[in-house]
Image (tube, rainbow, N blue to C red):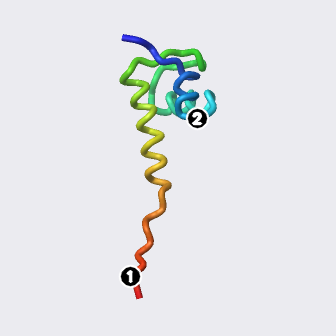
């Protein structure tokens, strides 16, 4: 089982390492630096947390039939 470094995950997500590190810590993962490793499940948890954020920020589609 390979480990994914925080900085590698940040690069994949097009984010700053510091931001991904903070998110991982908020999710309860024991990471201290950008070179800390995450197992596959932990990396997926961080990825999904960013997908949830982007889905929440997407505005609802406007209804053109109103009126």
Is residue 41 found left or right of 31 in the rendered image?
left
Circle number at residue 12: none
Residue at point 41%, 12% (across, down) = 2
Residue 20 falls in which quadrant of the image?
top right
Q: Residue 15, position in %: x, y?
A: 60, 34
Q: Nearer the viewer, residue 20 or 15?
A: 15
Q: Residue 27, position in %: x, y?
A: 45, 32
Reading the image, the residue beneath label 1 is 65
Determine the residue located farthest toward the top in the rendered image.
1
Residue at point 60%, 33% (across, down) = 19
Reading the image, the residue beneath label 2 is 14
Q: Quadrant of the N terminus?
A: top left
Residue at point 63%, 32% (across, down) = 16
Earlier sequence position, callout 1 versus callout 2 = 2
- Dot 2: what SS? loop
Q: Residue 36, position in %: x, y?
A: 54, 15
Vertical arrangement, residue 54 with respect to residue 10, above or below = below
Mark 1 in CB contact with mark 2 (< 8 angstroms): no
Q: Residues within 10 Å of mark 1 (few under 14, many from 20)?
A: few
Is residue 32 found left or right of 28 in the rendered image?
right
Residue at point 44%, 42% (across, down) = 51
Residue 67 falls in which quadrant of the image?
bottom left
Determine the residue located farthest toward the front in the rendered image.
64
Is residue 37 found left or right of 14 in the rendered image?
left
Q: How many marks?
A: 2
- Dot 1: what SS? loop
Q: Residues within 10 Å of mark 2 (few under 14, many from 20)?
A: few
Cα–Cα gap, marks 1 and 2: 38 Å
Determine the residue located farthest toward the bottom in the rendered image.
67
Q: Residue 11, position in %: x, y?
A: 58, 28
């Amino acid at each position: 089982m390979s480990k994914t470094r925080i900085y590698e995950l940040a690069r994949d997500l097009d984010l700053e390492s510091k931001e991904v590190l903070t998110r991982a810590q908020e999710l309860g993962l024991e990471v201290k630096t950008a070179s800390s490793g995450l197992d596959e499940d932990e990396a997926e948890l961080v990825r999904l947390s960013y997908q949830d954020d982007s889905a929440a920020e997407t505005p609802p589609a406007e209804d053109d039939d109103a009126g």
